């Protein structure tokens, strides 16, 4: 099955850019997702990218996909304190009901 | 559109008791998923439905777990004879099969087994 790995922690200053990285093993994932989870809450869908795309930009968020290296990244521009949360990447296969395999999450801490 | 709704948000139960969680998906969504998340981990897939049919169950879903979606709308997840290892957050998600790229999660139901 799919394995998804992420670094555990990232600390940035307010106003800087954050880059959260993710590697995955199953190149057949159709879609790759980024979710945000605040303490005690559910998962908020931030953005997703189809596997035949290299990049997707959505306001402050930029997703880069390197299929050759099976590497996915999420860049948050002008990081704010409200961005402090755990960020999960996940892969899904359309043919498999699109059930998702998640990484362990990256905790982003934004300091003043 | 009120999003995916889960109830209860928190449940504390004694070991050996049965618990049931309910999920109301986004109204037009025909796919419904259950995931489990333990502290410090990402969510793990448990099962999913398309309409009322349960199409896949994970090995994580032991015989003590049962999920239903009788009318293809809301779903329930029941855990019988709870064990301390069942303590986790149970997350429900929904999507529209024809546009399976957007999967929305609820706020989760926290279970603590004491």
Image (cartoon, coloured by chain):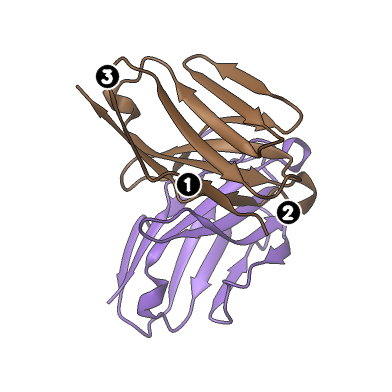
- Residue A107 percent location from the top left of the image: 35, 41
Q: Are marks 3 and 2 in one subunit? A: no
- Residue B21 percent location from the top left of the image: 46, 63
Which residue is most to the left?
A: A112
Q: Quadrant of the N terminus of chain A?
A: bottom right
Q: Residues within 10 Å of mark 3 (few under 14, many from 20)?
A: some
Residue B35 left/right relative to A54: left
Which residue lies at the image location 27% right of the left edge and 77% below the top edge?
A: B114
Which tag is nearer the camera, tag 3 or tag 2?
A: 3
Q: Which residue is mark 1?
A: B5
Which residue lies at the image location 64% right of the left edge and 21% below the top edge?
A: A55
Residue B108 left/right relative to B101: left
Residue A14 vs residue B44, the one in the foreground = A14
- Residue B27 percent location from the top left of the image: 62, 41
Q: Secondary structure at mark 2?
A: loop
Q: CA distance from mark 3 to mark 1?
A: 33 Å
Which tag is nearer the camera, tag 3 or tag 1?
A: 3
Q: Earlier in the sequence, mark 1 or mark 2?
A: 1
Q: Are marks 1 and 2 in one subunit? A: yes
Q: Chain of mark 1?
A: B
Q: Which residue is mark 3?
A: A14
Q: Color of chain B here?
A: purple
Q: Chain of mark 2?
A: B
Asked whether residue A69 appears in the rendered view, the answer is yes
Q: Which residue is mark 2?
A: B51
Q: CA distance from mark 1 to mark 2?
A: 17 Å
Q: Color of chain A here?
A: brown
């Amino acid at each position: 099955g799919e394995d998804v790995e992420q670094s555990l922690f990232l600390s940035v200053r307010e106003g800087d850019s954050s880059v959260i990285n993710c590697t995955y093993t199953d190149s057949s994932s159709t879609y790759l997702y980024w979710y945000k989870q605040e303490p005690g809450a559910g998962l908020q869908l931030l953005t997703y990218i189809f596997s035949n795309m290299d990049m997707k930009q959505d306001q402050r968020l930029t997703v880069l996909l390197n299929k050759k290296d099976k590497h996915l990244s999420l860049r948050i521009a002008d990081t704010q304190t409200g961005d402090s949360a755990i960020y999960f990447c996940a892969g899904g296969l359309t043919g498999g009901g699109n059930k998702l395999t998640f990484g362990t999450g990256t905790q982003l801490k934004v300091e003043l | 559109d009120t999003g995916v709704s889960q109830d209860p948000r928190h449940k504390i139960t004694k070991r050996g008791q049965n618990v049931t969680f309910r999920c109301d998906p986004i109204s037009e969504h025909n796919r419904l998923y259950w995931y489990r998340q333990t502290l410090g981990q990402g969510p793990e897939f448990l099962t999913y439905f398309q309409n009322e049919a349960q199409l896949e169950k994970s090995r994580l879903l032991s015989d003590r777990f049962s999920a239903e979606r009788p009318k293809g709308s809301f779903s329930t997840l029941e855990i019988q004879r709870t064990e301390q290892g069942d303590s986790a957050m149970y997350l429900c998600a929904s999507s529209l099969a024809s546009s399976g790229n957007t999967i929305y999660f609820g706020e989760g139901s926290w279970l603590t087994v004491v």
